[in-house]
Amino acid sequence: MHVVVLAAGQGKRMRSVLPKVLQPLAGKPLLAHVLATVRGLGAQSLCVVYGHGGEAVRAALDAPDLAWALQAEQLGTGHAVQQAVPHLPETGPVLVVYGDVPLISADTLKRLVEAAGPQGFSLLTAEFADPGGYGRIVRDAQDRVLRIVEHKDASEAERAIREINTGILCCPAERLRGWLARLTNQNSQGEYYLTDVIGLAVEDGVTVQTAQPSHDWETLGVNDKLQLAALERIYQQEQARALMSAGVTLIDPARFDVRGELVCGRDVEIDVGCVFEGRVELADGVRIGAHCVIRNARIAQGATIHPFCHIEDAQVGAESLIGPYARLRPGTVLAEDVHIGNFVEVKNSVIAAHSKANHLAYVGDADIGSRVNVGAGAITCNYDGANKFRTIIEDDVFIGSDSQLVAPVRVGKGATLGAGTTLTKDAPAGQLTLSRTRQQSLPGWQRPVKQKKTES
Ligand code: UD1
Ligand code: MG
């Protein structure tokens, strides 16, 4: 099977510099959704028809399996498919889909292609209560498809027809070429309609089969930001539905967004307002508190992420407790039972089991052993303004509050840093290291007393 994707529409109603088919749905361009779906069908060739100014589309989504056909002027859907003809094989079924209809499913397309068979013609149609604007399917007394009439060209009687053309069709390449060559633009819009191919096929004695989408919303197109938001909600509801069917607890499926792939184990619970991006894995028993943003991360069994955490390119170990208000940046690898508390930032650091940084700390470019306690306000000074250096903290260390560890530096096993220490040299194992002036009290010292102002 060969696929032609129509994507030459400018999308003026988006009122955006970004071409319509690059507008993101669930974090991914509309056209990328369609390409992913048709690639899943195992298409032998894929041709995208792009429009004037659509170089950005090509640049954003080019891939070795794609052919690009420029439609310099938008003269209609039939004209658009004509631009793809040089890229089509001599024979074989051709599936035409739209780049701005992102939710079309592989199941629906498979049924459409099967309905056509190797030599036949099939159309994806739907029954809409309000068919206004769509092309209508005109059938004969035996219910056979005769032709499609565009809304603008339709009579009153034809406008009463509720079966509409979704625009998606499948027909043999060898016949399509001839039909496209016979199209004219003698219609109310002065365009070459792809839909006129149906009438020509029927004239040639071809029976046009129809198939229906699994869900009507699969055929919805995007023209403006309102429709984009509406499809985003449908997409998110579907993800939520699939996850809940697989046993995930979503406190409110309407307040949940996956912009990528979310893989969940058993008994995972996700509170409201969370956003998952890239590939995120939540193992058995993981709990995610409200309003977390988690991107490209693995959260191991039984870990709890409290509300308002931001986690990116990180791994969280089993039974760990993160947040509220924690930030795990790229390169964070936490072993089991690690506690990262409020206003703690961790970056490019490995923290071994049972260690804790519970309050207001920065751990960057550090290797931290097991059972380490990082006190409130402790900071690894990993950057001298030009280069970055590592801090090594061995097992069972206690870092006193408000300490600064000026990297490169090492704290030996079992060492204690006194509160407020500025560590610039390695701290030996097992000892107390501190760097602060000795505390003193001055007996007899008195506070200054405010002087009375003399009148002048
Ligand atoms: C088309 C169908 C109509 C169907 C409707 C479904 C025709 C003549 N009509 O109408 O029967 O009910 O879709 O939504 O086909 N495009 C190009 N180049 C062009 C024109 C369009 O690439 O010159 C692309 C658009 O970017 C879009 C798709 O083709 O992805 C459909 O175009 P659109 O203008 O929305 O067609 P409709 O008039 O809505
Ligand atoms: Mg349209």
Image: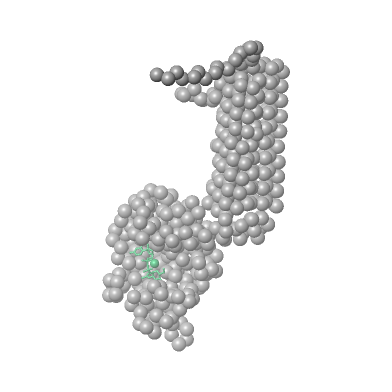
In this rendering, position of residue 441 left or right of residue 18 = right
| Residue farthest front in this picture | 455
Residue 331 is situated, as x and y percent measured from the top left of the image, at 57, 35
* Count of labels in the image: 0
Point out the quarter of the image occupied by ligand 2. bottom left
Residue 295 is situated, as x and y percent measured from the top left of the image, at 55, 44
Residue 382 is situated, as x and y percent measured from the top left of the image, at 54, 25
In this rendering, position of residue 343 left or right of residue 89 = right
Q: Is residue 298 above or below residue 67?
A: above
| Residue 402 visible in rendering | yes
Q: Is residue 381 above or below residue 43?
A: above
Query: In the depicted view, which residue is nearer to us: 328 or 42?
Result: 328
Q: Residue at x 44, y 62 (%)?
A: 227
Query: In the depicted view, which residue is nearer to us: 120 or 406?
Result: 406
Q: Quadrant of residue 71?
A: bottom left
Query: In the depicted view, which residue is nearer to us: 68 or 416?
Result: 416
Q: Residue at x 35, y 79 (%)?
A: 154
Q: Residue at x 55, y 37 (%)?
A: 330
Query: In the depicted view, which residue is nearer to us: 239 or 357?
Result: 357
Display colour scheme: one colour
Q: Quadrant of the C terminus?
A: top left
In this rendering, position of residue 189 left or right of residue 140 = left
Q: Is residue 1 above or below residue 274?
A: below
Residue 92 is situated, as x and y percent measured from the top left of the image, at 44, 65
| Residue farthest bottom in this picture | 141
| Residue 100 visible in rendering | no
Q: Residue at x 59, y 31 (%)?
A: 361
